[in-house]
Structures are given as C-alpha cells and as structure tokens.
Amino acid sequence: MIADSLRSVRSTLPEGVTLVAVSKTKPVELLMQAYEAGQRVFGENKVQEMVDKAEQMPEDVEWHMIGHLQSNKVKYMASFVSLIHGVDSLKLLAEIDKQAAKNGRVQDVLLQMRIATEYTKFGMDEADLENLLTSAQFSNMKNVRVRGLMGMASFTEDESQIQKEFSYLKQVFDRFKHRPDFDLLSMGMSGDYLLAIECGSNMVRIGSSIFGDR
Ligand SMILES: *Cc1c(COP(=O)(O)O)cnc(C)c1O
C-alpha cells in the first residue's frame, strides 16, 4: 500500500523537510493513491511524462522536474512546473527565464552541483556556480528565482564518502544562503536521505521507498 509506505517515510522526516515523492515510471493510479494520502509534491525526471501525468492529476499538485533537462523541452512544462531541480548551465537558465516570461511566471529553480566521485556530465562545480551567480546575464534575468542547490551523492555503500559529499554541498549552500530566496537544499534519495538530513538537507527526493522498485 502506497499510503502505508508514504506514512512510514513521513514519520522519519523532521519538520521543515519537504518530501518530493519521486513517481517516475509509475502509473497515475499509484500517484493518486499517494495524493489521496495527502501527498502534493511529486517529482518526475522526464518532461513528457510529467506533462501527461499533470493533465490527469488534480490542479493542486506541485510538480518538480528532478531530471536532467534539455533546453528545447523547457517550453512544454513552463506553464505549470513548480520547481526545476537540475539546472546546471547559464544557457539552460536563460531558456527557463525566457519561457517563464512568456507564461507570465517567475520560475523557481535549484542549481545542480556535481558532488559525486563518479564521472557525470551533469552538475556544476563551485567555480561554475560562482560564475553563474555573478554573471551580468544572470543579473538581467527577471523571471527565474534561484531557490538553492541540488546534488546527488556517489552510488556507493561507503557512508563516510556519502557524508563527505553531502557535507560539502551543505557548506557551499551556506556560502550562498545570504542571497534572497535561497533557502532550499535538495539532497537525499531512498538509500541516503536520513544521512542527507543529518547533513542539512531540507528537501528529499524519495521514489522507491514509497512506490516500490522501478
Ligand atoms: C529517481 C531519482 C530519485 C529517487 O530515487 P529513489 O532511489 O527511488 O528514491 C531522486 N533523485 C533523482 C534525481 C532521481 O532521478
């Protein structure tokens, strides 16, 4: 039962930590079970799938895009997506700003940092982040609001490694949290969210512990 797994996950979350129920690949019927159990924030990693589900779900769902995003897909979700977690370039941010303006919205986003030891093309390092936030191009964007950071730890059993990566992300977050509206730190998934919360996460993205294996 989704309601039961949702309840047991929720019971482990301190106040102030937002649960993003990651529903990628799962059918709308399961999402609706979570909705009926009170869940309102859902995370998807593919634009088309999120759009399809949004059409079938109640209006008060908050949709979070948690996956890697291509610029040419932004327009399909620009009218309704509530938070985009995976922004890792000025170019992508510029497209989000443009599409948000077209929709008369200010789009909340998180900047994704690369913290894992594994090779990945996605995510920025601290210098990229600094360059983006201090760029003239960014300062001219009126329709995006950078709400904080997102990161994914290494896929490893080594908890001390994961803790090191989360703590590093928290440290970078703290460096920038004087910025207006910079208040969200999205880190932690089914396997590592308790550790992420210990390290300062206030937004966890949990899929398989709620909806089962994919
Ligand atoms: C799939 C996914 C999750 C959730 O993973 P689980 O291990 O199922 O909890 C979290 N974050 C991102 C970016 C994902 O793609």
Image (cartoon, rainbow, N blue to C red):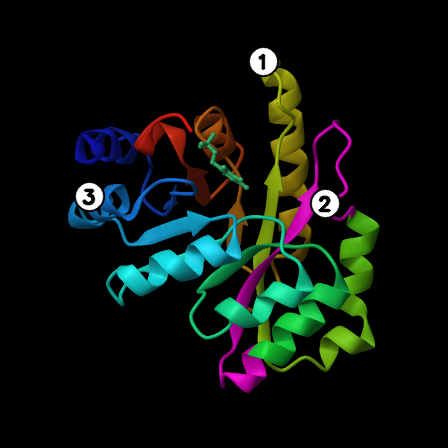
Q: Which mark is residue 33?
A: 3
**Crowding at mark 3 (Cα within 10 Å: few <14, some 14-19, many 20+):** some
What kind of element bears circle 2? loop
Q: Is residue 136 visible?
A: yes
What kind of element bears circle 1? loop
Q: Is residue 115 inside the magenta stretch?
A: yes
Q: Which residues are magenta?
A: 100-125
Q: Position of residue 62 (x, y in %)?
A: 36, 60
Which of the two residues, 44 or 153, is positioned nearer the viewer here?
Answer: 44
Does label 2 or label 3 sit earlier along the sequence?
A: 3
Q: Is residue 199 inside the magenta stretch?
A: no
Q: CA distance from mark 1 to mark 2?
A: 22 Å
Identify which residue is drawn at 57% across, 84% down. Answer: 101
Q: Quadrant of residue 11?
A: top left
Quarter that holds the N terminus: top left
Does label 1 or label 2 sit earlier along the sequence?
A: 2
Q: Which mark is residue 122?
A: 2
Q: CA distance from mark 2 to mark 3?
A: 33 Å
Numbered disc in front, either 2 or 3? 3
> What residue does disc 1 label?
157
Quarter that holds the C terminus: top left
Numbered disc in front, either 1 or 2? 2
Mark 2 residue type: Phe
